[in-house]
Structure formats: C-alpha cells, structure tokens
Amino acid sequence: MLAPHPDDEVLLCGGTIIRLVESGARVSVVHVTDGEATLAPGRRASLARHRRREARRACTVLGVRDVLALGLADGGLSRSLALTAEITRVLERLRPDLVIAPWHGDAPGDHAAVARALDAALAASSRSPTPRAWSGETWRPLEPDGLVDTTAVRSRQRAAAACHVTPRRVLDLDAGLALHRYRGWAALGGHGTCEAFVMRPPPVRRGPRRGLPSP
Ligand SMILES: [Zn+2]
C-alpha cells in the first residue's frame, strides 16, 4: 500500500489491509512522506520521527510488520522529481500482485501526485502481468468499481486510527473513517462499513466483495 502520509494507510484502506492479512497475504505499507508538515513549521525533523513511530504502531494493529518510509517532502510530492523513480524502486523490490494507492482526484497535491507516479511506474514496468492497482478515497469520494466489506474489522481499524495521535491535533480522523460508514450504509442495506476502490483490471461483478483476491 502506497500511503502519501502516515494515517492514509488506515483512512484509505485499513479495513481492507486487515482482511488481506487475515486471508494470508503478505502486506507492506510504504509511507511516501513522514507527514512532517501536519503541524506548524519549525520542528519538522522531530515531528517526522514521531509520526514514523505512530505509523508503526498503527500498522502493528493492522497486522502489518513490513513498513517502509521513503522520507520524501510532505507537501512537495507534486514537484518531486524522485517520486516515480522511488515508487519504481519499491515495486521492483516488493514485486506486489496488488498495489493500493489514492485515486487521481482524491486531493490535489501529494495524493494526486502518488496516483500519477504509480501510473507512470506501472506503465514503465516490464513485469508481466502488470500488478493490479486499486485506487481508494480519503478526501474526495470516487465512483467505485468495487467495494470491500470491512464491517467485521472496523473496531480494529478504529484502534489503528487511534495510534495516529499527532494528526488528531488538527484533523478529525473519525470523520475520515465515516466515509466507510456511508459506503456500508449505501451498499449493505443501511449498516456496516465498506471501502471503495477503482479497480484495475475492473472486477467481473460490481458491488461489495465478500471475498478478497487470493494472496
Ligand atoms: Zn494524506
């Protein structure tokens, strides 16, 4: 999973990650930046270290032990000349079957930059078949190809979100998670939670996925 900032792994697809881990998949989370621009400038280095620690705790709750930090500049990914090369390097190292990242319209700046860079990295990839790509939502809703039912794991997802103490000083992370409640409300008959994705290649049938792709 490519997270532009620590906390995106929980907000965008934390429930899907838990379900993938439970299905036996080997999941890695890659934080592209350390989220060091979250608070007022002036103590970015210490804030980056702090947010890395919080992110590792959150990933432990999700069941993920393989957590990588690329350390690119928070807020500067749309101007980064290194972003596509870094993502290419990560894909070559991890050789994933599936990559989860933000969708292109999720938010201008870092999220959209990661979406574009992943596109470029996959287009240049010589692997066959090309890894599947699921694009998810945090800041702006998308038109989904498919949804993952995360109802059974939502309390663990909330526990993982609680590990991100620093962004909670300026962001209501529970409001971010509420998007999944809306998806569940709309797709599961008025209850539960789902995470929505644009899926490449698209699923055979639209609607909530009770089963995940085999690891
Ligand atoms: Zn973010």
Image: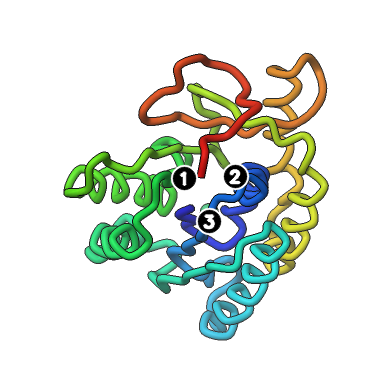
Q: Disc 2 to disc 1, how far (Cα)? A: 8 Å
Q: Amino acid at mark 2?
A: Cys
Q: In the structure shown, which secondary structural element does the residue marked by tag 2 occupy?
A: helix
Q: Quadrant of residue 192?
A: top right
**Cα separation between marks 1 and 3:** 13 Å
Asked which secondary structure carries label 3, the reply is: loop
Which residue position holds label 2? 13
Discs 1, 3 touching: Cβ within 8 Å: no
Residue drawn at x 52%, y 39% as measured from the top left: 214
Which residue, given by chain and number where applicable, does mark 1 sit on?
100
Frontmost of labels 2 and 3 is 3
Q: Name the residue that disc number 3 marks.
A: 26
Drawn side of residue 9 relative to residue 76, left or right = right
Element on which disc 1 rests? strand
In-front residue for pair 22/56: 22
Hey, what amino acid is under mark 3? Answer: Arg
Q: Which mark is residue 200?
A: none
Name the spot of residue 139 as percent of width and height, x first.
56, 41
Between discs 2 and 1, the one toward the N terminus: 2
Residue 32: % across, % down: 43, 63
Q: Nearer the viewer, mark 1 or mark 3?
A: 3
From the Cβ of disc 3, is ligand 1 less than 8 Å away? no
Q: Nearer the viewer, residue 113 or 161?
A: 161
Give amino acid for label 1: Ile
Q: Is residue 127 above or below residue 54?
A: above
* Residue 35 image offset from top left, x and y in percent: 53, 67
Q: Are marks 2 and 1 in contact (CB under 8 Å)?
A: yes
Cα–Cα gap, marks 2 and 3: 15 Å
Which badge, 1 or 3, comes first in the chain's sequence? Answer: 3
All told, the count of numbered labels is 3
> Callout 3: few (<14), some (14-19), or many (20+) C-alpha neighbours within 10 Å?
some
Q: Earlier in the sequence, mark 2 or mark 3?
A: 2
